[in-house]
Amino acid sequence: MLKTCDILDEKDKRLRQVSEEVVFPLTKEDHKLIDTMIQYLHDSQIDELSEKYGLRPGMGLSAIQLGVAKRYFVVVHELTGPDDEEKEFDTYVLVNPKIISNSMEQIYVTDGEGCLSVNRPVEGIVPRYARVTLEAYDMEGNKVQIRAREELSICFQHELDHLNGILFTDHIDPKNPFKNKDSMRAI
Ligand code: CO
């Protein structure tokens, strides 16, 4: 079972490399890794399980965060609201993803973005497109097109950055962490 401490920390240089395009088919190891990533992201968002296993909650992980420099990531996106009894999730596994179009409008997370590789509080605004359309491949190598907005759009952009060796903290100007705040919408 994947634990929080198995995820590379921002100090690890491997997070800075540009991951390689995947050549299909995915290997057995890739499938195994994807399964453990999905399980982690799912369990970490269920209060009882995250407490029981000490999992820091997260909704996205890229392969490089587990030391595998291949262009794929997993997102487990909660669909339910705070009052729903059972949580429901959508799971995305995107291979060789790229943004093919984006909105002009930009948004940012009011409370600041988070990352399972960044284990400290970081203040500041990360500008993201409000809406993106991605082209990617599923695990079997079929081409897919996905539209995302709001939180999911931010998450995809965050994970895509990981594949290019970029962390969300890179987008924040330390001298002026709330720069251009008024030209973007907070979510
Ligand atoms: Co991250």
Image: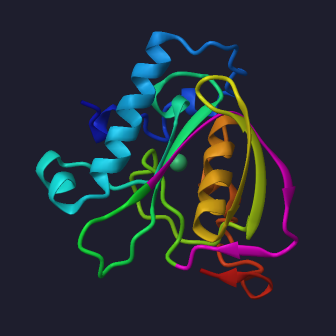
- In terms of depth relative to the viewer, which is nearer, 166 or 3? 3
Q: Position of residue 37 (x, y in %)?
A: 40, 36
Extreme residue in the left direction: 52
Q: How is the image coloured?
A: rainbow
- In terms of depth relative to the viewer, which is nearer, 175 or 105? 105
Q: Is residue 176 visible?
A: no
Instruction: Please state, as top left, top right, bottom left or bottom right, where the C terminus lies in the image.
Output: bottom right
Q: Is residue 67 above or below residue 135?
A: above
Indicate the quadrant where residue 69 lies: top right
- At x 53% / y 64%, what residue is drawn? 113
User: How many marks overall?
Assistant: 0
Q: Position of residue 111 (x, y in %)?
A: 49, 76
Direction from residue 182 to residue 27 in the image, left or right = left
Which range is magenta?
Answer: 90-110
Magenta stretch encompasses residue 96: yes
Indicate the quadrant where residue 93 lies: top right
Q: Position of residue 155 (x, y in %)?
A: 59, 56
- At x 57% / y 15%, what residue is drawn? 26
Direction from residue 15 to residue 129 in the image, left or right = right
Instruction: Please state, as top left, top right, bottom left or bottom right, where the N terminus lies in the image.
Output: top left
Q: Is residue 127 above or below residue 28?
A: below
Q: Is residue 105 visible?
A: yes
Q: Is residue 14 above or below residue 49?
A: above
Q: Main secondary structure of the magenta part?
A: strand
- In terms of depth relative to the viewer, which is nearer, 185 or 74? 74
Q: Position of residue 15 (x, y in %)?
A: 57, 33
Magenta stretch encompasses residue 137: no
